[in-house]
Amino acid sequence: MTQYKLAIVMLTHERSDCVEDNIKNFLRFNPNQTLIIISNDRGLDISHLAQDHVHIINRRPKSWCDAMVPYHIEAYDYMRANDLAADYVVTVSSNQMFLRTGFYDFVQRYSAGYWARYHHFRWDPWCRCEDKLCDTFYVDDLKEENLHNLSNHDGMFFRWDVFSQMMDYFGVHFRTRYCVHMIEERLYAGYLLKNIAPEQLAEFDQYNFFNWSDCGVEEVKAAQERNLYMIKKISRKYQDPARVYVRSLP
C-alpha cells in the first residue's frame, strides 16, 4: 500500500486550466507525500492532467445524486482498490486553494475539521430525502442534537481512520441509491459530533477563510493576515485577479 501524508479529494467540472491551477497549488503548498484524487464530471476530459500522484476519476453523472457524499465514497473506494491511503484526507472544491505551507502539521493536532455553522434542524426546508431514508436511518442514528450544523464539505479534513469509517458508514446506503433533497451538509458534521470529542475537532475559522461570493485580492490578503491555510471561494476563471494573486504567492 502506498501511504501519503495528505490525500486531497476534489470534485470538479471546470475547464482543465483551472483544474491544473488547483493541482499546482495543492502540490506547491503541500509539497511532500501529497495524493490528489480528482472526481471529474464526465462532460469534461481532463485525463491528460493525471500524473504519478494525481488520479482522475470520471465520476458517475450528476443525475445519479444531487449530493457530494456518493462522490466522496467513490473516491474512497478508488483509493482502497488501488492500495492508496493517507494519514489525513481533505475534501475540497475547485474554487478553494491553499495560501501557505504547514497544513499537515496543523491537522495532526486533530481528528477532523468542520464548519460549525448553526442552523436549527427543523428550520431547513431541504432536510428530508424523498424516500425518507434520512428519517428512518441517519437522523435516528446520528440524533437531531448532532445535526444542527450546516457545515461545508469543501475544506473538511479527516484522519484516515475517521474518514474510512465514515465512508463505510454512509456507503451502506449511498453507494447504490438515488437521493434528492437530502441533508448532506449536516451528515458529516453530525457523524463527527456523535463519534469524536469536541476538543479533537477543528473549526473552519482556525484554518479556512470563507466568503459567500468569489473573493477579491483584498480577501486573500485578509486571509493571509490571519495566517489561514485555505481560502474559499476563489473564482474558477484562470485569469481572475484573486486567482492570479494566489498563483503569485511565494
Image (cartoon, rainbow, N blue to C red):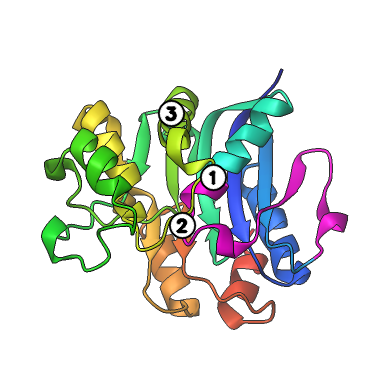
- Kind of element beneath mark 3: loop
User: What kind of residue is marked 1?
Assistant: His
Residue pushed farthest top?
1
Specify which label sits upstream in the sequence, 1 or 2. 2
Name the residue rendered at 69%, 76% in the picture: 238
Which mark, by number, is residue 72? Answer: 1
Magenta segment: 45-72
Name the residue rendered at 74%, 28% in the picture: 82
Instruction: Give the CA separation, mark 1 to mark 3.
Output: 21 Å
The answer to whether residue 142 is seen in the rendering is yes
Specify which label sits upstream in the sequence, 3 or 2. 2
User: What kind of residue is marked 3?
Assistant: Gln
Q: Is residue 59 magenta?
A: yes
Compared across the picture, whether 222 is left or right of 216 comes to left
Quadrant assignment for the N terminus: top right
Name the residue rendered at 20%, 47% in the picture: 147
Between 68 and 202, which is closer to the camera in this rendering?
68
Q: Residues within 10 Å of mark 3 (few under 14, many from 20)?
A: few
Q: Is the residue 167 above or below the residue 227 in the image?
A: above
- x and y, in percent, of residue 244 in the image: 65, 75
- Kind of element beneath mark 2: loop
Residue pushed farthest front?
131
